[in-house]
Image (spheres, rainbow, N blue to C red):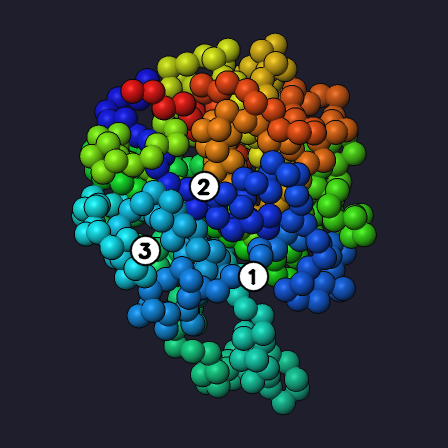
């Protein structure tokens, strides 16, 4: 079982194709809205998959202090998403960080010690801006029209800003968030694809429980909506290429007719803090984090272990850490990306954990509504799970009306269902690499 200080969730920030901010996001889940459609960020006509989940428009100036806006020129899309989530999480938690105070949204003095404020943020391998990069590459061609390394070093690189690389380093999400909100305690970046957010929140949980921080902002964010990010899963056969005309039913988690996932952008950041710290500042408490488990089984570089052994091990470890049995869980939130192999592996892993007890347990799957945004997917699920626990309500899961016969989950199809929830488990697996992270959340009780 976990030892050390109790850790609670006091703030939620989320950016998803169905809404920015926790309340708009939650309302969209309840109302069965879908955020998938034809790609608008670029012309997708040359790709077999032409649909994605894109965020509603937003202005970064609404989320950072005026004096920091010049830094936006070295922020890739993934970083922008993290900044939106960080601001909303801090505001939701009523934390008076320098960013929030500078924007006039927290007039009181800082209520968190910067030296005890940490950050753990999951990130993907940020794709370069093709327009910017192509312009520089065009100046590095030789007389024969072919790319020349010599000309690239002499002329091509001169056409990129000296700070160009800083836009695309995965750790820059945590870098900008910690600068703006003055997080000086342990900080880390985790790049384990879809498992990143769960692993980041789990590490923050451990950091606080053992006394190395009092507060931590954690989660993940990523944008998969660009040609380079979509090309790789296309080559691996992971994207649905058959539903360009019907994007709202394209991603079918655990469906017997699932045909692949849908690329998306988004993520979430949550505020964790010790119970004592939250009490001292009179914070609202959404839920308590009571268990974390991680595992890995890289049985193949591109395909998951069909038995889902790492999923089962991570969830079992999280339950053991929380000191509860599977029969004490009322809600599970699997990843459910909608690919044939990965969903099958998940189903096997979860069934091993719950055995005959899983079918009565309610389940929630968000990919049908928001798509797969890589490192940000798990954070979206964590926010959804936290809200379901906090509200004692399980939202409907889009496109789960025709489930695979092997699927052990009990999804809500129509109206949301009110269910007393004391414990919820959420887990996510990396589509390649075998990493899995799992968290157990509990309804907060004094």
Residue 217 seen by the camera: no
Residue named by callout 2: 197
Q: Using the rendered view, name the quadrant where residue 341 is placed.
A: top right
Q: Is residue 339 left or right of residue 422?
A: right
Q: Position of residue 373 (x, y in %)?
A: 57, 48
Judge depth for marks 3 and 1 and give the one in front.
3
The structure residue drawn at horizontal position 58% and vertical position 11%, both measured from the top left corner, is: 357
Q: Position of residue 7 (x, y in %)?
A: 30, 30
Q: Are marks 2 and 1 in contact (CB under 8 Å)?
A: no
Whole-angstrom CA distance, mark 2 to mark 1, is 24 Å
* 81 up-or-down from 32: above or below: below
Classify mark 3: helix, strand or loop.
loop
Quadrant (top left/top right/bottom left/bottom right) for the C terminus: top left
Q: Earlier in the sequence, mark 2 or mark 1?
A: 1
Residue named by callout 3: 105
Quadrant (top left/top right/bottom left/bottom right) for the N terminus: top left
């Amino acid at each position: 079982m976990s030892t050390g200080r109790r850790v609670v969730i006091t703030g939620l920030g989320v950016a998803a194709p169905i809404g920015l901010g926790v309340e708009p996001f939650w309302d969209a889940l309840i109302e069965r809205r879908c955020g998938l459609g034809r790609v608008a960020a670029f012309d997708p006509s040359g790709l077999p998959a032409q649909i994605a989940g894109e965020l509603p428009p937003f202005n970064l100036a609404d989320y950072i202090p005026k004096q920091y806006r010049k830094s936006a020129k070295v922020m890739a899309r993934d970083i922008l998403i993290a900044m939106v989530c960080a601001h909303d999480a801090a505001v939701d938690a009523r934390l008076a960080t320098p960013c929030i105070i500078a924007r006039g949204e927290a007039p009181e003095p800082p209520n968190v010690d910067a030296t005890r404020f940490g950050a753990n943020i999951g990130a993907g391998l940020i794709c370069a801006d093709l327009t910017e990069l192509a312009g520089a590459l065009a100046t590095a061609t030789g007389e024969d029209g072919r790319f020349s390394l010599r000309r690239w070093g002499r002329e091509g690189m001169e056409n990129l800003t000296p700070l160009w690389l800083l836009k695309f380093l995965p750790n820059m999400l945590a870098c900008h968030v910690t600068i703006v909100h003055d997080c000086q305690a342990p900080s880390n970046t985790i790049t384990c694809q879809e498992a990143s957010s769960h692993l980041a929140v789990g590490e923050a949980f451990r950091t606080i429980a053992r006394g190395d921080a009092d507060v931590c902002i954690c989660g993940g964010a990523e944008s998969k909506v660009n040609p380079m990010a979509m090309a790789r899963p296309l080559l691996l056969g992971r994207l649905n290429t058959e539903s360009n005309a019907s994007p709202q039913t394209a991603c079918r988690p655990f469906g017997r007719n699932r045909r692949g996932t849908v690329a998306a952008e988004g993520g979430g950041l949550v505020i964790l803090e010790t119970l004592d710290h939250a009490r001292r500042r009179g914070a609202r408490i959404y839920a308590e984090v009571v268990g974390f488990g991680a595992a890995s089984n890289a049985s193949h570089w591109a395909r998951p272990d069909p038995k889902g052994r790492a999923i089962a091990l991570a969830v079992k470890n999280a339950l053991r850490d929380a000191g509860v049995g599977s029969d004490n869980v009322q809600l599970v939130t699997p990843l459910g990306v909608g690919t044939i192999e990965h969903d099958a592996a998940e189903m096997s892993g979860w069934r091993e954990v719950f055995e005959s007890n899983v079918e009565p347990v309610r389940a929630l799957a968000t990919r049908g509504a928001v798509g797969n945004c890589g490192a940000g997917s798990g954070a979206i699920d964590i926010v959804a799970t936290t809200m379901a626990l906090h509200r004692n309500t399980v939202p409907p899961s889009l496109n789960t009306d025709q489930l695979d016969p092997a699927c052990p989950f009990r999804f809500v199809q129509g109206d949301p269902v009110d269910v007393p929830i004391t414990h919820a488990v959420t887990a996510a697996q990396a589509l390649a690499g075998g990493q899995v992270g799992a968290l157990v959340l509990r309804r907060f009780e004094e």
